Image: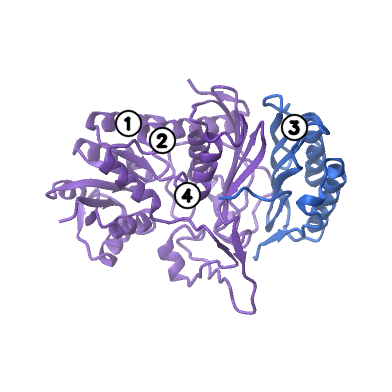
């Protein structure tokens, strides 16, 4: 029997598609079931059952899964709106929890999760970029003094997926703030979904809390987002406790707008100069008569190309024009989580960090709505 | 609709960009980006990120910032509104700006003693994007 028994909460067309396979590839772990609440939508239930079938696992109710003998890890990717109660239940059952990003759709839900985690005293980690080679290199440069005193951090997460499309209107988008709804089949709110990457990266690199947030969400790139009246792009200006500045660009920019899955980078301005760390920066470049990349047709249920399962359905191939010399290991973040359970070491991004990320992003929505900076207490 | 990414030819390599030539280098970059926009390569410009770092013995942060703001105004057509003042510490000026069209920019001008000109540019349009690096990247 493996050291850890893992349940996955969610299914296809959630990040569980990738995370749970990473757990399955770790010899210390045995994935024992896919689970969710019994009253999920038919669409969600079918996607969950499909993933369970692909992995030859039982699909159970959350109650049944939590009662499996010896289960001690939950990999939790339920819909954003259900995370407060589901993650709290996992902690109440005494599980270590690997959490999808962002933690929750409101500060209240995030705090509820943190309280349950604190009571359980188990290990928590939220998915982020901090275990990638380029983020680790950036952290080392700061800690080793190579950058000198940091004055500014500039972080980008621009996802090159989805087919850019003609917009119905030509007016700037008007932000209405967060209404707590983040789950849509065809698109996501990207200040939230992509914005959590630069927010988590900048706070991890600085080791500080953000005290003030400004944000703009006036752009549209995709008709799908325009029709849903949700943002596909956002910019943020963050001020940390000591006055250090961070900026973040986050969103979706179109599948043909970058040679890899997206621009992921951080530039550090220190008193010793400018330092840039980026995914795929050290690379070979391949140009050929052969078809290097095929985007595939628009999938009606995943036009933003969010999920590996639907990208496979439309025959999309891997982008291979830029091939990194130091490719990120897709299992690294989950391996680091299991390492922390083994060693008792604190994960790099815990539930407490994740609560702050939600605070920052929600302050960002409020700033974008009002046009004013928003302070975080 | 197909979108495109435009990797501008690095006509000036890092070792060819001295502090005194930064302004002429930048203006050439501005012309190249304008040419890509005018050719319709990226559709309508919608978001810009520029980080420009220069030698403190040749440039001050205000001048570095002003250089990139001028380019942003050129690509987006007019002044941002409201024209937010830049913020940051002595050695870096950072601003998040928006234009009447909704176009957004994050601009950062900074200096340090003895620095080689360096930085990066990302311009996102409705049909594609322009990228440019002014220097190499640190070793992983």
Residue to which mark 1 is pinned: A114
* Rendered position, A8 above or below A141: below
* Pointer 2 local density, CA inside 10 Å: few below 14, some 14–19, many at least 20: many
Question: Which one is in front, A80 or A17?
Answer: A17
Question: On residue A242, which mark appears?
Answer: none
| Residue A190 percent across, percent down from the top left | 52, 46
Circle nearer the N terminus (1, 4): 1
The Cα–Cα distance between marks 4 and 2, rounded to whole angstroms, is 18 Å
* Rendered position, A276 above or below A239: below
Quarter of the view holding residue B89:
top right
| Residue A374 percent across, percent down from the top left | 56, 25
Whether residues under marks 4 and 2 lie with C-beta atoms below 8 angstroms apart, the answer is no
Question: Which one is in front, A83 or A208?
Answer: A208
The Cα–Cα distance between marks 2 and 1, rounded to whole angstroms, is 9 Å
Q: Residue at x 48, y 45 (%)?
A: A193
Residue to which mark 4 is pinned: A132
Instruction: Tell me which chain appears blue.
Output: B
Whether residues under marks 2 and 1 lie with C-beta atoms below 8 angstroms apart, the answer is yes
Q: Nearer the viewer, mark 2 or mark 3?
A: 3
Instruction: Tell me which chain appears purple.
Output: A
Residue to which mark 3 is pinned: B113
| Residue B131 percent across, percent down from the top left | 70, 53
| Residue B111 percent across, percent down from the top left | 74, 33
Q: Residue at x 42, y 47 (%)?
A: A183
Residue to which mark 2 is pinned: A354
Whether residues under marks 2 and 3 lie with C-beta atoms below 8 angstroms apart, the answer is no
Badge 2 and badge 1 in a common chain = yes
Q: Nearer the viewer, mark 4 or mark 2?
A: 4
């Amino acid at each position: 029997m493996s050291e850890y028994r893992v349940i996955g909460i969610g299914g296809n067309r959630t990040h569980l598609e990738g995370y749970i396979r990473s757990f399955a590839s770790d010899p210390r772990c045995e994935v024992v079931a896919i689970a969710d609440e019994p009253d999920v939508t038919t669409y969600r239930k079918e996607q969950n059952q499909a993933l369970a079938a692909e992995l030859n696992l039982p699909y159970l109710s959350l109650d049944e899964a939590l009662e499996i003998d010896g289960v001690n890890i939950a990999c939790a990717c339920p819909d954003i709106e259900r995370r407060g109660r589901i993650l709290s239940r996992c902690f109440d059952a005494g599980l270590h929890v690997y959490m999808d990003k962002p933690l929750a759709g409101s500060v209240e839900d995030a705090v509820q999760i943190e309280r349950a985690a604190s009571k359980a005293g188990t290990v928590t980690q939220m998915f982020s970029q901090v275990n990638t080679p380029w983020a680790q290199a950036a952290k080392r440069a700061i800690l080793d003094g190579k950058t000198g005193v940091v004055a500014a951090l500039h972080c980008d997460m621009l996802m090159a997926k989805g087919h850019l499309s003609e917009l119905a209107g030509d007016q700037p988008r008007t932000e209405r703030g967060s209404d707590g709804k983040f789950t849509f089949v065809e698109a996501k709110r990207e200040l939230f979904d992509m914005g959590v990457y630069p927010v988590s990266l900048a706070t991890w690199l600085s080791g500080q809390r953000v005290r003030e947030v400004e944000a703009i969400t006036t752009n549209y790139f995709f008709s799908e987002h325009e029709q849903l009246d949700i943002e596909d792009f956002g910019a943020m200006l963050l001020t940390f406790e000591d006055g250090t500045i961070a900026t973040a660009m986050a969103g979706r920019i179109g599948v043909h707008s970058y040679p890899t899955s997206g621009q992921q980078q951080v530039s550090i301005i220190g008193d010793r100069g400018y330092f840039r760390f980026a995914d795929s920066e050290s690379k070979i470049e391949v140009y050929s008569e052969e078809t290097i990349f095929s985007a595939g047709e628009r999938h009606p249920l995943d036009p933003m190309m969010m999920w590996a399962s639907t990208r496979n359905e439309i025959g999309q191939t891997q982008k291979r024009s830029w091939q990194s010399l130091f490719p990120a290991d897709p299992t690294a973040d989950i391996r680091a989580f299991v390492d922390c359970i083994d060693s008792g070491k604190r994960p790099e991004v815990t539930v407490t960090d994740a609560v702050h990320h939600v605070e920052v992003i929600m302050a960002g929505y409020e700033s974008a709505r009002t046009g004013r900076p928003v302070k975080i207490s | 609709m197909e979108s495109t990414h435009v990797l501008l030819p690095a006509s000036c390599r890092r070792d060819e960009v001295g502090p005194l030539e930064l302004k002429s280098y930048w203006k050439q970059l501005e012309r190249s980006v304008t040419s890509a926009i005018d050719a319709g390569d990226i559709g309508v410009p919608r978001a810009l990120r520029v980080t420009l770092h220069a030698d403190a013995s040749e440039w001050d942060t205000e001048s570095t910032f002003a250089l990139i703001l001028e380019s942003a105004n050129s690509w987006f057509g007019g002044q941002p509104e409201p024209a937010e003042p830049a913020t940051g510490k002595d050695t870096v000026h950072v601003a998040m700006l928006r234009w009447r069209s909704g176009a957004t920019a994050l601009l950062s001008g900074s200096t340090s003693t003895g620095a080689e000109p360096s930085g990066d540019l990302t311009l996102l349009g409705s049909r594609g994007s322009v990228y440019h690096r002014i220097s190499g990247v640190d070793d992983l």
